[in-house]
Image (cartoon, rainbow, N blue to C red):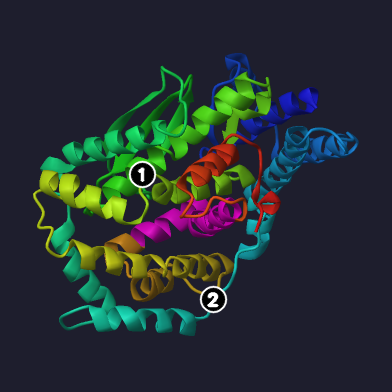
Amino acid sequence: MNTVAEAYVKLVLDVGQHDADYVDAYYGPKEWQEQARASRKSLDSLRQAGVELMGRLREIDVAGREEMLQLRHEYLLKQLKALVTRVEILGGKAYTFDDEARGIYDVTPPSYTEEHFKKMLDELNTLLPGNGTVTQRYEQFRKAFIIPPTKLDTVFKAAIEEARRRTKQHIELPSNESFVVEYVKDKSWSGYNWYKGENYSLIQINTDLPIFIDRAVDLAAHEGYPGHHVYNVMLESNLMRGRGWIEFSVFPLFSPQALISEGSANYGIQVAFPGEERLAFEREVLFPLAGLDTSKAGKYYRLAELASALSYAGNEAARGYLNGTINADDAARWLEEYALMAPARAKQRVRFIDQYRSYVINYNLGQDLVKRHIEASGGTADKPEKRWEEFKRLISSPRLASGLKQ
């Protein structure tokens, strides 16, 4: 399997020559990158190479072998299937939203009707004061919880330090692990982790739009501890270096691995900051650092919890937009009405869909699948130690969506 794994890594780097977003991280041999830049193979030849590698993998019998070896075999097979699908999309082949999600992320996303989201908005409607649409009143209420730009770095540093402290109580990390934070603009995303290898990440926070107080913990945990930074450190330490599995020296963004990465990063927020512990930390530490009034914090988080349940409305906007049943303006209007996004944020999200397509499912569906897997494995909210144990096990393995317990 090692020879197939090496060929897979080189193939991912080759696809990256046609797709600037494809190679999210790479810390393998530099000469392989140089070879990929020099050769720039055609999309047709890359597709054929992917199909041939899948055939070679299927000839390898792993029945009866250790679970991790079976997981590795399945991982490479699904990653290669995703690569072939992505290459076909780059070549102009039309995929529906659902077919693309199945081919790339190893999962079929659920579908919800407009009526489903209308019913969910009813409770928010009764809780929000003032006049106007639910979205307008929600945005008006939330204005009191924006982190002042001059205090953004201070608040983020405090959130990161607490997320790191909590994570290190349960997960042993290499002594040299670290990351730096940069504040950037003109991006389609709110935050991004660029893993560089050797246990180091660059985390960028987009400041195009106002950043609300709850996003400090969200981004600190999602991008850092125990999210993307820890996920990549664990894979590098345990699989790439510990087992010598070279395929984990590269992270193709459009792949089943991304669903586990995003899903565990989102679920990791509540693993590190469960329930009332999060609210207490933010009230006692982050609100004062940001200079915000804590008197309505409870209501703010209650509304945020209800609003988060509307995240699947974003998937429906992407489904319609990518399937061609709605245009970009219609998608933005849908996001404003059913995902409670302000107009500027809705337009930013459409930009994200343009750039990353069905990737949007990895945040909410990925989180739900990871949550169900960990709870089915015994890591329920009333057993925090077991939850951390199962979380660590997941982010240290090649397990993909179709292999999660439900």
Q: Which residues are magenta?
A: 347-375
- Mark 2 or 1, nearer chain start: 2
Determine the image quadrant of residue 347.
bottom left
Quadrant of the frame with the N terminus: top right
The magenta stretch spans residue 196: no
Q: Give the tally of numbered discs.
A: 2
Q: Is residue 9 left or right of residue 276?
A: right
Crowd rating for badge 1 (residues with CA inside 10 Å; few <14, some 14–19, many 20+): many
Q: What amino acid type is highlighted by mark number 1?
A: Gly
Name above or below for residue 345 compared with residue 291.
below
Residue at the disc numbered 2: 112
Q: Residue at x 26, y 54 (%)?
A: 279
Judging depth in this view, the residue of 181 and 184 nearest the camera is 181
Crowd rating for badge 2 (residues with CA inside 10 Å; few <14, some 14–19, many 20+): few
Q: Residue 301 placed where, x, y %?
A: 27, 63
Judging depth in this view, the residue of 160 and 298 nearest the camera is 298
CA distance for labels 2 and 1: 27 Å
Q: What amino acid type is highlighted by mark number 2?
A: Tyr
The magenta stretch spans residue 361: yes
Indicate which disc residue 191 carries.
1
Q: Residue 249 placed where, x, y %?
A: 60, 25
Judging depth in this view, the residue of 235 and 253 nearest the camera is 235
Mark 2 falls on what kind of element? Answer: loop
Name above or below for residue 331 compared with residue 217.
below
Q: Residue at x 48, y 81 (%)?
A: 116
Q: Residue 35 placed where, x, y %?
A: 64, 19
Chief secondary structure of the magenta span? Answer: helix
Q: Residue at x 17, y 83 (%)?
A: 131
Name above or below for residue 150 compared with residue 357.
above
